Amino acid sequence: MTAQDRIKETIEKNDVVLYMKGDRLSPKCGFSSRVAGVLNYMGVTYVDIDVLSDADIRQGIKDFSDWPTIPQLYVKGEFVGGCDIVTEMMLSGELDALFDASGVAYDKAAADKIREANA
């Protein structure tokens, strides 16, 4: 199975997938840490894929999305974006709306606290 096939299968089989450097408990870069932190704090169930542990996946995800940077967040099979986009969506409430529309469970009060802390 190619890296592209593995990526496609992972994204199709899981509601929320984060390709990141490190993992949710031990991120290896600040951008990955920020996105994982948002998802963790919001109580989102997601699959974290450490691109540092597999060079084929690390390059493959960039080719798959045609997006040059990591982390990359996918919701219900669709590419959402990287750290800046996810952060902006979180602060504007768009991430909540995406999760609501996609049927992804999250802690709305936690999301509100993030926005309050960044107001």
Image (cartoon, rainbow, N blue to C red):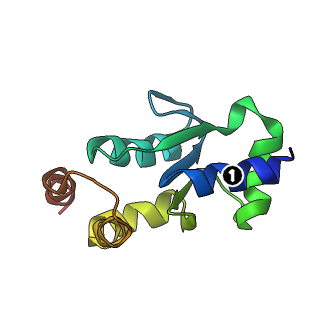
Q: Quadrant of the N terminus?
A: top right
Q: Residues within 10 Å of mark 1 (few under 14, many from 20)?
A: few
Q: Residue 43 location in percent, x, y?
A: 28, 44
Rendered residue at 61%/55% (across/down): 11
Image quarter hosting the C terminus: bottom left
Q: Position of residue 92 (x, y in %)?
A: 28, 72
Nearest the camera: 45 or 58?
45
From this view, report whether residue 49 is shown above or below residue 108.
above
* Residue 14 in the image, given as x and y percentages of width and height: 53, 50
79 vs 8, nearest the viewer: 8
Pointer 1 residue: 9
- Write the residue at 58% across / 51% down: 13
Which amino acid does the dot numbered 1 rest on?
Glu
Quarter of image, res 101: bottom left
Asked if residue 49 is positioned above or below residue 13 in the image, the reply reads above
What residue appears at the point 74 percent right and 57 percent down from the top-left corner?
Answer: 62
Q: Is residue 49 left or right of residue 43?
A: right
* Residue 78, quarter of the rendered image: bottom right
Residue nearer the viewer, 118 or 75: 75
Q: Is residue 87 left or right of residue 18?
A: left
Q: Is residue 61 above or below residue 55?
A: below
Q: Nearer the viewer, residue 99 or 81?
A: 99
Q: Position of residue 110 (x, y in %)?
A: 18, 50
